Structures are given as structure tokens and as C-alpha cells.
Image (spheres, helix red, strand yellow):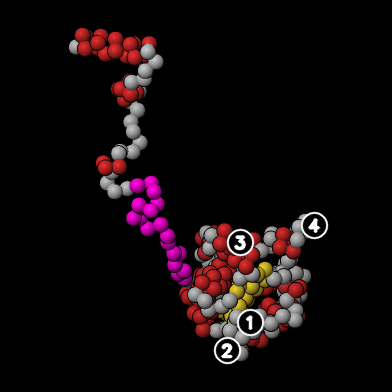
Amino acid sequence: MEASMTKRAATKRQTREHGILDSRDFMEESKVRRLHAPHNERSGWSPNPSNDDREQGYLKTLKPKSEGQIEMMEAIDTHNLVMALGPAGTGKTYLAVAKAVEALEAGKVGRIVLSRPAVEAGESIGFLPGDMEDKLAPYLRPLYDALSDRLSMKRVKALMAEGLIEIAPIGYMRGRTLNNAFIVVDEAQNCTYVQLKMLLTRLGWHSTMVVTGDPQQSDLLPGISGLSDVSARLEAVPDIAVVRLAERDIVRHPLVASMIGVL
């Protein structure tokens, strides 16, 4: 045993003196192991995507989590105008945007139009730099989040560049007719009666409009919001669906439902 170790040490010293590295030094002393076995020893796996048989793509399935969400999704499928009213956390905005993406991907509509009032939640943030989209970006963040959850952000930017996803400020909607489009009006509790009347009458042929909001969380002065009045009037119209979500439909943290009940 000692003779073998002496011979091995002499061999190592000789190779080092001649500037030669022996791979056995690393394999035996440093315990370095190869990360991957040779290709013929692998069990079929390869880092090359073309040789990888695993499924790389996936599709997020949109599933309702409450009775109210089931009612809202069915209403969007069967009506051209849907008003979804309910407290925070009931999934109103997410379901509306998800249905809009689903309709666009299926070729049922030619574009998505997103609109939201630029009203601060009780705190003025002053003048914002940039063009119109830059100024509206903070207000439309919830819509972007829902879009990026259904599509990659790269795809969202590409669709916006092509005009298939449009950001339309409420102030610029007057006089337009939105044909072959899926329109989502978010935070409608911050719209006046006149603004909502103008928005609802933009609906054109082969289009679907979903208006979401919580009448109890308006950032306008008391009595200014027109959402409650408009929804009460439209509830009597046969071909318009007014879906009222409740605390039991909240899908956020359980504490949200508890807080909504006492605040």
C-alpha cells in the first residue's frame, strides 16, 4: 500500500514538473464530478430544446371560484353589455380582462379596448411626464397586471404596437363607435352619470362591453358617482346583464372579506 502511494506521488510530482495536468488529481483528491454523463450514457435528456420531448407550453384555464363569478362569466358569454358590481377582491377586473383576451385569441373580436377614469384615490400625485400612455400607466396598472397574467408582457407590448390592445382614456371616448371590440371599463364608480351614459352608448356591432366597479368605494365627492343610478336603471332592460357580487365572492386573503364586512 505504501509503495503504491509513493509511486502515485512520484508520478504526480513528475507531471507537475513538466507542466502536465493529470485529470486523476481532480477526480481523486478534489472529488470533482462531471455535471452530465456522456450523451450515450444519458437517459434521453438533452439541453438542446429540439431534443427535449417535455411539454414546454401551458394554458392557464380560467375557472370561476364562486357562484358570483360563475354568474359573471355566463353573463359575458350571453350578453353584449354586462355591468359587474361588487366589493374589492371579487375578481371583477381580472375576469373581464381574461374574457377579453379569450375573445381576442379565439378571433371573436378584432381588438381590446381598456378604459379607466384617471382619478387618484384621495391623494394627488401631480403632473406626470411622458406621452398619454405614460401618464395613464399608473392608473391602468391593474389592467396591465391582468393582461400580463393571461399573456406574456412581450406579447402585450406587441399587441399594443399593432393596435389590437388599445388604452382609451374616458375623456377621449366621446364620438367614437367601437365595432368588433371587447371593451372593459374598470373602476366605473369613479365615473359620473354623464360619463357612464357616454361610455355605454359607444357600443357598436359585434362588440361586448363589461363595466366593473364598486359603488361603495368611489373616490368622487358624495352623490357624484353615477354607477348605482345607471345600474339600477339598466337592470330593467332585458338584454343587459347586471351582476352583483357579494362578500362571499371575494377570492383574495380571507381577511379582506372580514374587513369589508365591518368597514
Magenta region, main secondary structure: loop
What is the spatial separation of the Cα atoms under label 3 and label 1, in whole angstroms? 22 Å
Q: CA distance from mark 4 to mark 1?
A: 35 Å
Q: Secondary structure at mark 3?
A: helix
Disc marking residue 157: 3
Mark 3 → mark 2, Cα distance in angstroms: 34 Å
Q: Secondary structure at mark 2?
A: loop
Q: Amino acid at mark 1?
A: Asn
Q: Which residue is mark 2?
A: 239
Answer whether residue 121 is visible to the viewer in this image.
no
Magenta span contains residue 116: no
Q: Secondary structure at mark 4?
A: loop
Q: Which numbered mark, 4 or 3, is in the foreground of this view?
A: 3
Query: Which residue is under mark 1?
Result: 179
Which is nearer the eye, 20 or 253? 20
Tell me where the magenta segment starts and ends, as one range: 46-64
Name the residue type under label 4. Gly
Image coordinates for residue 33, horizontal then vertical, percent:
33, 31
Question: Judging from the image, what secondary structure is the residue with disc 1 in?
Answer: loop
Q: Is residue 203 visible?
A: yes
Residue 71 image position (x, y, % from top left): 50, 78
- Which of marks 3 and 4 precedes in the sequence? 4
Mark 3 surroundings within 10 Å by alpha-carbon count, few (fewer than 14), some (14 through 19), many (20 or more) = some
State which quarter of the image contains the N terminus. top left
Mark found first going from the N terminus, 4 or 2: 4
The quadrant in which residue 54 appears is: bottom left
| First reached walking from the N terminus: tag 2 or tag 1 | 1
Q: Give me the residue at 45% from left, 69% from top.
A: 63
Q: Amino acid at mark 2?
A: Asp
Give the answer, above or below, for where 33 lies relative to 40: above
Indicate which disc residue 126 carries.
Answer: 4
